[in-house]
Image: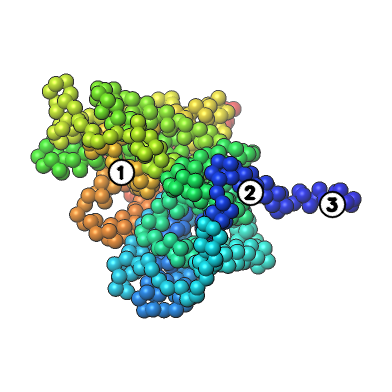
Amino acid sequence: MSAARRVLAVLEHPDVKFGMWASAGTLAILIFVGFIFPAPPSILFLGAVLGSLNALMAMGLVLIYRANRIINFAQGDLGAVAAVLAVSLIVGPRWPFFLAMLTGLVAALALGALVEFTIIRRFARSPRLILSVATIALSAVLAGVQLVIPRFFGYDVAPQNFPIPFRFSFEWFPVVYTSSHLMVLVAVPLAAAGLGAFFRYSRAGVAVRAAAESSDRAALLGIPVKRIGTLVWVLAAGLSAVAVLLRAPIVGVSIGSVLGPSILLKALAAAVLARMERLPIAFVAGLLLGVLENSIFWATGRTLVSDAGLFFVIIAALLLQRRGSVSRADDREASSWSATREIRPIPRELMALPLVRNGARAIQVVVLAVVVLWPMTQNGSRVNLLGVGLIFGMIGISLVVLTGWAGQISLGHLAFVAFGGAVAGRMSQNGWHFFVCVIAAGVAGAVAAVVIGIPAVRIRGPFLAVTTLAFALATGSFFLNPEFFPWLVPDGRVLRPVLFGKFDLESEHTYYVLLVIVLLVVMASARSLRRSRTGRVLLAMRDNPRAAQSYGVSPVRARLTAFAYSGFVAAIAGSMYVFHQHALSTTILRPEESIRAFQMVVIGGLGSIPGGLLGAAFETFLRYSPFTKVPASRLLGSGLGVLVILLFLPGGLGGLLYDARDNLLRRIARAKGVVVPSLLADVRVDEGASADDEAMALNLEGMQAGVDLELLEAR
């Protein structure tokens, strides 16, 4: 082989290519930062030091994603439990510093194995979307554990000040590096190099890589896939523990808030830049994002601007990444993020029966009467809380359309709600009519949702979820910050008007009736959308994009239509919320509330409108129930409750409701002697069906087989 060919062969090696692109990207970003946000070299180096901690967490996210194809929202909390334990041991029983840190690390490794064995394996056959929501619930449980641990050592919260056994100080103007920074400079390279050596030279590391590529092939080769999965979670928990333990001496211990995007989203952004695949790229991206964040902070003196910068970096990276060819395996992986249980309407054969038809109408009338009449007997404060539940019901319906029907995951949906509330509140203060404010808010929300939904044309699965979460963070800290956009955010109290000179909306009962009317209109429009051609196109694109495109369906138009409608409804809910609260509430500006809203709909059931409403009712109960007032019990109770629901009710509360309905309809059909194929298709003996139902199902299958045979003979 000639020297030129040898050089070309070396340059074509993936690792060499990565090094070239990483070096070029590093140089480009540093030049960009130097021109836009000039900062001294010591500030850039400090950003790389802090960014290396996020890089370790990003590597853990990539490991979990490659093994389980999920976003692990509990990644930060796995390490936070270790940090709280270590700090409590240092300050309480006065354990030696390094012994306490080692104990925290071992506890994190054990916790990772426990989580994989007790929770992740239980959701092995569940859609990836459900498993990701389970990690959100797990993060709430771990946050509750962080609040409980210090009480065993006589503290209300984990101590923030603790001694370090050695002193080091080095001034590189204007930064003074201490022993805390020195530990990061020593430990992070060792952890990264050790992880790389583990994957390259150890048999277990090679097995992890093989299982990540294809678990089925790995199992055929005799690799213990389950044990490998446990090992991956142990490694991810260890990386998170190292990152949070090293972070604690610098900025303190975050209690119950590691789920918050202020920390986790930086690691998620680095993982997304690596397309959740390449560990080296994730590490370098974490370093560069740390440099960018610190440079912006140095130039502006505010961390809020860096949130917007992080959002634009994610958007640019996703849009500029090469799409490449999409295989059927990729389609199946994406669909696993949007798998929902389809809810069938009452069969026509049974709706023709007066008993079923009149019974369904009677149930609707009773529910409507309870929702409208019962609150009229309550005091104003109770009615006010019930109104919040109705507004969250509108938000739930908008998420059912976007995620349940269109298959697009939005973890920052309350940002659209906030934009709608800001527009409506500001216009109301400028003297516009109430209904004009509401419609204008809906249009603003639709436009914002379409702009954010443009990456959905190219990217599916978890990447869009991270984008919307970054948008929620930027919205709360930058876009709807009166310091930066005073003309957009309402200033002062937003008054409720008097409609038609007769209905004073300042009355809680009157405004509640208006909320019921708006919710009914939203429900009717969503139901009409589901029955229209647009609704059928959305479901077709969700379940089988290739087949839908073969019939001339435009995926761009279908997905952006879902975003526009969902953003419109969410912004309408936001406009009602700003009048309800008399201000733009800071609650909907917190990104973690957007994650809770998405979790709410998954709990209720993504497949139907009643599921979204049930999820809103469940969330309202968790927020305002007197049983969940204590912070630790609220976090533990809600997280454990969500895990139980996801484990035993994969279809959500709505699925449970429709199962009860179908069982009742089967009894009626059997009593009336009506054969309903759509009801009998799901009957199985192992599901507890009666012998009569099983016999009817077998007869139906036999009849269908006979029809197929006759058609075949005719051909």
Tell me the kind of residue under disc 1. Thr
Question: Which residue is at the front of the view, 181 or 253?
Answer: 181
625 vs 707, left or right, is: left
Tell me the kind of residue under disc 3. Arg
Mark 3 vs mark 1, CA separation in Å: 61 Å
Quarter of the image where one finds residue 154: bottom left
Considering only vertical position in the picture, is 707 above or below 193?
above
Upstream in sequence: badge 3 or badge 1: 3
Kindly tell me whether residue 149 is visible in this rendering.
yes
Question: Which residue is at the front of the view, 591 or 490?
Answer: 490
Residue tagged 3: 6
Indicate the position of residue 635 as horizontal and vertical percent values. 31, 57
Q: Secondary structure at mark 1?
A: loop
The label nearer to you, 3 versus 1, is 1
Indicate the position of residue 142 as horizontal and vertical percent values. 38, 61
Residue for point 37% across, 26% down: 443
C-beta proximity under 8 Å, tags 3 and 1? no
Indicate the position of residue 373 as horizontal and vertical percent values. 13, 36
Upstream in sequence: badge 2 or badge 3: 3
